[in-house]
Image (cartoon, rainbow, N blue to C red):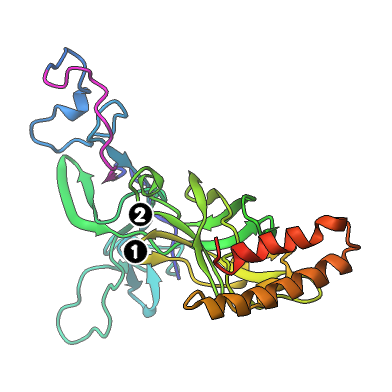
Amino acid sequence: TDHKPQTTNHRPQTTNPRPQTTNRNPHPTKQQVGERPFECQDPTRVVPCASPSYPHRETRLTCAIWKTPEGFCANDWNRACSCADTEACPLECEGTTTCLNKPPTGTGHVVEATVRPAIRCEVPGWLDTNSDLNVYWHGVKTTLSHWYAPSEPVVTKVEPSSTPYTGGGMLTIHGANFGPEHAWEGGGKGAIIIEGKSMSGVCLAPRFVGPEMLVCKAAPLSANQHEVDATLMTVDVNVIVATSPGKRSRVNSAGALKFSSVPSYFTCKVSVATQRDKNTCFTCCRSACMVDEVAAGATRGGATFTHCDTACYSYCGFT
């Protein structure tokens, strides 16, 4: 059973270094009075440096005491209590019964305090991997090196649920753990992948909106043989978010996406190994394209043949 945390006037300040940013000082070798925040000038380095004007700043986390030392009631070791050692604990123990918090001595005890003090902090989703955790307590700094590793990205929804097979449709991906932000900047390793049974493409122009939202422009359906739904004319794929080579979201129904209005010729096998393979693909493609055009009412008229020839030359790798 968790107990309410004890009130304290000394809240721990826990920080996590934020990735370095560009120094805005046009003359980085010159330091002006007041340019560097006072808190970042501490020579002992026991004061958190969280000022946004300092490029090597730390990110101050929001923390609270989560658990306090816990013992057991003197008259019943099955009942936990969080009062100070040997003090009466009427709310958790009955009457004036005291709470025992110290390790037992002798042979008359069968249980000892098992819950250690703990604090819980909220960690933003844009922090970098392998960051240090600095804990400041009464002027003493404790560092846990390479402590932080973000969780795997999670995709909870993709909007809209379908996009044209030609690509270019804007997609919004909802979820969690999409940081750090710099993974989506120039040279970053962040990527939004559109993956299906017969394709794996990268979403174009990905943009980091926040640790729970990304936007990008859908890539076109790859010129390859796919399982096309003959009734809906769709191809099922999945959206995957990768923030680094080892951090990818899992394939699930929440990341499902459909390519819509897919022509029937996307069921034709594409092979560019030989001219014969290309010709076989073209025959299949042209036949499927003509069937689609007739089913749609042959609205292109005399341009139907030209349309199908152009589409199939491209699909089968002639151009």
The picture quadrant where one finds residue 228 is bottom right
Q: Give the range drawn in magenta.
A: 13-29
- Tell whether label 2 touches label 1 (CB within 8 Å): yes
Sequence order check, earlier mark of 1 and 2: 2
Q: Is residue 212 above or below residue 85?
A: above
Q: Give the x, y percent position of residue 143.
A: 17, 51
The amino acid type, in three-letter code, at marker 1 is: Pro
Residue linked to disc 1: 245
Cα separation, mark 1 vs mark 2, equals 7 Å
Q: Identify the secondary structure beneath mark 2.
A: loop
Residue 253: name its quadrant.
bottom right
Q: Is residue 99 above or below residue 10?
A: below
The residue singled out by tag 2 in the image is 189
Q: Residue at x 36, y 43 (%)?
A: 186
Q: Which of 56 and 99 is in front in this view?
A: 56
Q: In this view, does 297 lie to the left or right of 79?
A: right
Seen from the viewer's position, the closer of residues 262 and 177 is 262
Three-letter code for the amino acid on which mark 2 is drawn: Lys
Q: Indicate the position of residue 57 as horizontal and vertical percent values.
A: 25, 35
Q: Residue at x 19, y 29 (%)?
A: 40
- Left or right side of 27 for 114: right
**Residue 197 visible:** no
